[in-house]
Image (cartoon, rainbow, N blue to C red):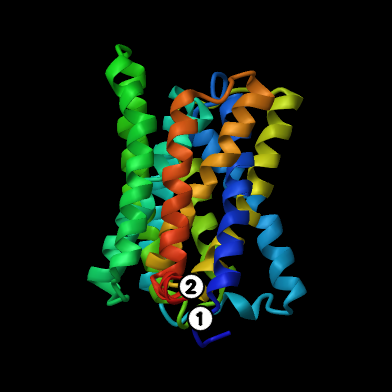
C-alpha cells in the first residue's frame, strides 16, 4: 500500500461511489440545517464518520498500526483545508438546495485539474482540457440562470460559500494525491475527521441546539455516509491522477438532482436537461483522451 498504483477504471468507479455517498451526507445535513448550527453538524458528522474508518482499518488489519504516518505536516495541511471546506459547504447547503450546493462543488475538479498539472506535474492533454471545458459549460448552463434571478442575499452568500468550499476542497484533494504515495487511505481520512471533529467541538461555546431523536439519527447517518465516502474518495485518488478524475466529478450531479426530486419534490429543471449532454460528453472525451477516438476514425 505504500506505492502509488495507477488503476484508472477502479479510481473512477470509486469516485462515482463517493459522490453518491456524499449526496446522502448532504441530504442529512440539509434536513437538520434549520435547527442545528453548522459547527454542531460538523462535530457529529465527523464523530460518527470515525466508525467506518475504524472498521475499514480493522478489516485490513491496520489498526492501530495503519495510523502511523511519515508526513504529519501533509496530514495537517490536508486536514486544515478539508475542515475549512466542510464548514463552508455545510453553511452553503443550509442556504441552498442540495442540488445547487453540489453544483457549486463541481468547481472543485476545475481547480484540481489546473493544480494537478501545475503543482503535481501531471500529464496535460487537449482531450482532457476539452472534456473539462465541456463540463464547465454544463455548469454554466445550470448556474447562470440562478445567479441572474437571485435577489436574496442568503442565496448569494450560499453561492459564495459553495465556491469557497470548492476551492478549499481542491487544495485538500491535491494534498491527498501527494501524500497518498506514502500514507494509507484510512490514515488520511482518520486524521482529517479527528481535526474536523475538534474544530466542530470548538464551536460549543457559541451555542448548540438540543437535538430531537430524528435530528440525532440524521446526524449519525451523515457521519456514516461521510466516512464511507472519504474512504472511497481517498482510494480513488490513489488509483488515478487528480486531473484524470476531474471530469468524472460531474456525474455526482445526478445524485442530488434525484434527491431533490424524490425527497423534496423538486422536478428536474430544463437547465439540467440542457447541461447533462455537455457534461457527459466531457466525461467521454476526457476518458478516451484521443486514443479510442483515433482508433474509431481509422476504422
Per the rendering, the mark at residue 240 is 2
Image: 219 above or below 82: above
Would you identify the image quadrant in which residue 101 lies? top left
Q: Nearer the viewer, residue 32 or 272?
A: 272
Per the rendering, the mark at residue 6 is 1
Image: 70 above or below 11: below
Q: Position of residue 185 (x, y in %)?
A: 56, 71
Q: Nearer the viewer, residue 13 or 204?
A: 13
Direction front: furthest residue:
299
**276 horizontally vs 121: left or right:** right
| Visible residue check, residue 211 | no
Q: Are marks 1 and 2 in contact (CB under 8 Å)?
A: yes
Q: Position of residue 250 (x, y in %)?
A: 47, 48
In the rendered view of the protein, which quadrant contains the N terminus?
Answer: bottom right
**9 horizontally vs 182: left or right:** right
Q: Position of residue 200 (x, y in %)?
A: 49, 42
Per the rendering, the mark at residue 233 is none
Query: Image point 28% across, 64% down: which residue?
Result: 115
Total marks placed = 2
Query: Image point 60% across, 40% down: which residue?
Result: 255
Query: Image point 55% across, 69% down: which residue?
Result: 11
Amino acid at each position: 500500500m505504500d506505492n502509488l498504483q495507477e488503476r484508472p477504471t477502479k479510481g473512477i468507479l470509486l469516485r462515482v461511489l463517493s459522490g453518491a455517498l456524499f449526496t446522502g451526507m448532504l441530504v442529512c445535513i440539509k434536513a437538520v440545517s434549520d435547527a442545528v448550527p453548522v459547527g454542531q453538524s460538523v462535530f457529529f458528522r465527523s464523530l460518527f464518520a470515525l466508525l467506518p474508518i475504524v472498521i475499514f482499518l480493522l478489516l485490513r488489519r491496520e489498526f492501530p498500526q495503519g495510523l502511523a504516518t511519515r508526513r504529519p505536516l501533509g496530514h495537517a495541511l490536508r486536514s486544515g483545508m478539508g475542515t475549512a471546506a466542510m464548514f463552508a459547504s455545510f453553511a452553503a447547503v443550509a442556504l441552498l438546495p442540495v442540488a445547487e450546493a453540489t453544483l457549486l462543488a463541481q468547481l472543485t475538479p476545475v481547480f484540481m485539474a489546473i493544480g494537478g498539472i501545475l503543482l503535481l506535474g501531471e500529464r496535460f492533454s487537449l482531450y482532457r482540457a476539452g472534456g473539462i471545458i465541456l463540463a464547465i459549460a454544463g455548469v454554466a448552463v445550470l448556474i447562470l440562470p440562478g445567479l441572474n434571478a437571485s435577489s436574496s442575499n442568503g442565496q448569494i452568500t450560499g453561492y459564495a460559500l459553495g465556491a469557497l468550499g470548492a476551492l478549499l476542497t481542491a487544495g485538500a484533494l491535491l494534498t491527498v494525491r501527494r501524500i497518498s504515495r506514502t500514507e494509507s487511505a484510512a490514515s488520511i481520512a482518520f486524521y482529517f475527521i479527528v481535526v474536523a471533529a475538534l474544530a466542530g467541538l470548538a464551536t460549543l461555546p457559541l451555542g448548540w441546539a438540543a437535538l430531537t431523536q430524528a435530528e440525532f439519527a440524521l446526524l449519525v447517518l451523515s457521519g456514516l455516509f461521510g466516512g464511507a465516502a472519504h474512504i472511497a474518495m481517498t482510494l480513488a485518488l490513489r488509483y488515478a491522477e487528480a486531473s484524470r478524475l476531474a471530469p468524472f466529478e460531474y456525474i455526482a450531479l445526478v445524485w442530488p438532482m434525484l434527491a431533490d426530486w424524490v425527497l423534496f419534490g423538486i422536478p428536474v429543471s430544463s437547465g439540467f436537461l440542457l447541461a447533462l449532454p455537455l457534461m457527459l460528453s466531457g466525461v467521454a472525451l476526457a476518458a478516451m483522451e484521443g486514443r479510442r477516438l483515433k482508433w474509431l476514425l481509422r476504422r
